[in-house]
Amino acid sequence: MSNKNKTEQDQYPFDDIRYICNSTGLITNSLQKGFDVAQLPNGDIIVTEIRIVNVQYTWDKTKQKMIKLNQVL
């Protein structure tokens, strides 16, 4: 195998069954979790995860300020 062919295979792994199996699982799991997924032409995969954090505050009349009650991830 020439260096040119090896370089092309490294850049485009879509003919490698191991890559296809692993990337398909990663993409499927990420989409099921509601994440955004982008698969680049070189085979790289970008997953954007957004975490929602709910924080509850209450007004403390004595201290005259907002007090954090709890935080839920």
Image (cartoon, grey):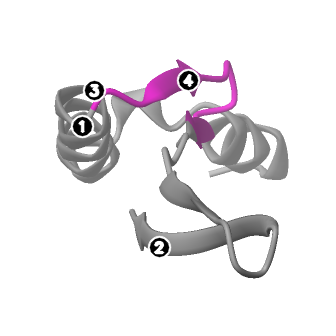
Q: Which residue is mark 1?
A: 33
Image depth: mark 4 or mark 2 in front: 2
Q: Which mark is residue 69?
A: 2
Callout 1–callout 4 Cβ contact below 8 Å = no
Q: Which mark is residue 39?
A: 4
> Where on the picture, by quarter, is residue 58?
bottom right
Residue 69 spot, x, y in % from top left? 47, 73
Quick one: label 1 or label 4, which is nearer the N terminus?
1
- Asked whether 73 or 49 is in front, the reply is 73
> Where on the picture, by quarter, is residue 12?
top right
Image position of 3 with respect to 69: above or below: above
- Disc 2 to disc 3, C-alpha distance: 33 Å
Callout 2: few (<14), some (14-19), or many (20+) C-alpha neighbours within 10 Å? few
Residue that appears at 31% across and 27% down = 34
Tag count? 4
Q: Is residue 20 left or right of residue 25?
A: right
